[in-house]
Image: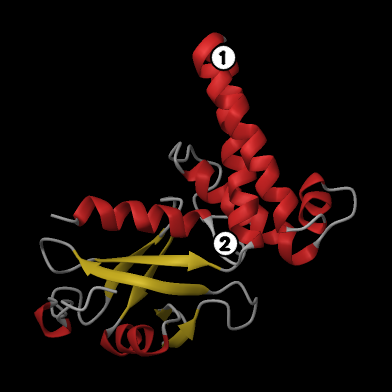
Amino acid sequence: MNSALDIDAIDWAKGAGLLPAIVQDAVGGRVLMLGYMNREALEQTLSSRRVTFYSRSRETLWTKGESSGNGLDLVDVVIDCDRDTLLVLAHPQGPTCHRQTDTCFDPTPEPLMAELGRLDALIAQRVRDRPEGSYTTRLIEQGALRVAQKVGEEGVETALAGAAQSTEQLIGEAADLVYHLGVLMHVRGSSLADVLTRLRERRREP
């Protein structure tokens, strides 16, 4: 969370007390939606950690997901250089758009690195729902030890591909490794997002 956010520094007057709030997936990087916030909506967002907007049509506050269940868990809020637009980083809890699409801007190209966030979310869903016939379900039900063994096997296969096989084979083995590593992280109660967070922390270290 950006503890340096100064609500009083925001230029509330420019938009007559109402500012556009761009919501971005904190992991995948996709732009999810555009809403509007007044000061009260922003304060409630910061205190509840659930993204809350001001409805211009109903002239009242509304928290994303209060009826659909597809809420937005707050990660951070920053203001732009003109102090009249908010960028909200959040973890979406289900489809963001009322059309049941991930974002309100579908169909649209998405950042390539968003695939990592999509994979992480899919594995989490498999862990939670255990759908029949899913390879991930079968793998999870074999336990953490077996998943760890699979990560080891895929790691060896990736190394061998890197040493003696084609680049295309290396890419394929690396993809298998990332997937199995993601499953292991979730089986152990963590996620690929936690790995990315650790990498970010290391980048910021002196």
Residue 176: image quadrant is top right
User: 96 or 134: nearer the eye?
Assistant: 134
Q: Residue at x 47, y 74 (%)?
A: 73
Q: Residue at x 78, y 64 (%)?
A: 129
Other residues around mark 2 within 10 Å, as few (<14) / some (14–19) / many (≥20): some
User: Seen in the image, is 39 located left or right of residue 136?
Assistant: left
Q: Which residue is mark 2?
A: 97
* Residue type, numbered disc 2: Cys
Work out which quarter of the rendered image holds the N terminus and state it: bottom left
Residue 33: image quadrant is bottom left
* Residue type, numbered disc 1: Glu
Residue 58 in sight:
no
Classify 173 as above or below 109. Answer: above
User: 34 or 74: nearer the eye?
Assistant: 74
Local secondary structure at mark 1: helix
Residue 42, given in percent of the width and then of the height, sits at 31, 83
Which label's residue is closer to the chain start, 1 or 2? Answer: 2
Q: Residue at x 26, y 86 (%)?
A: 39
Residue 165, given in percent of the width and then of the height, sits at 57, 10
Q: Which residue is mark 1?
A: 168
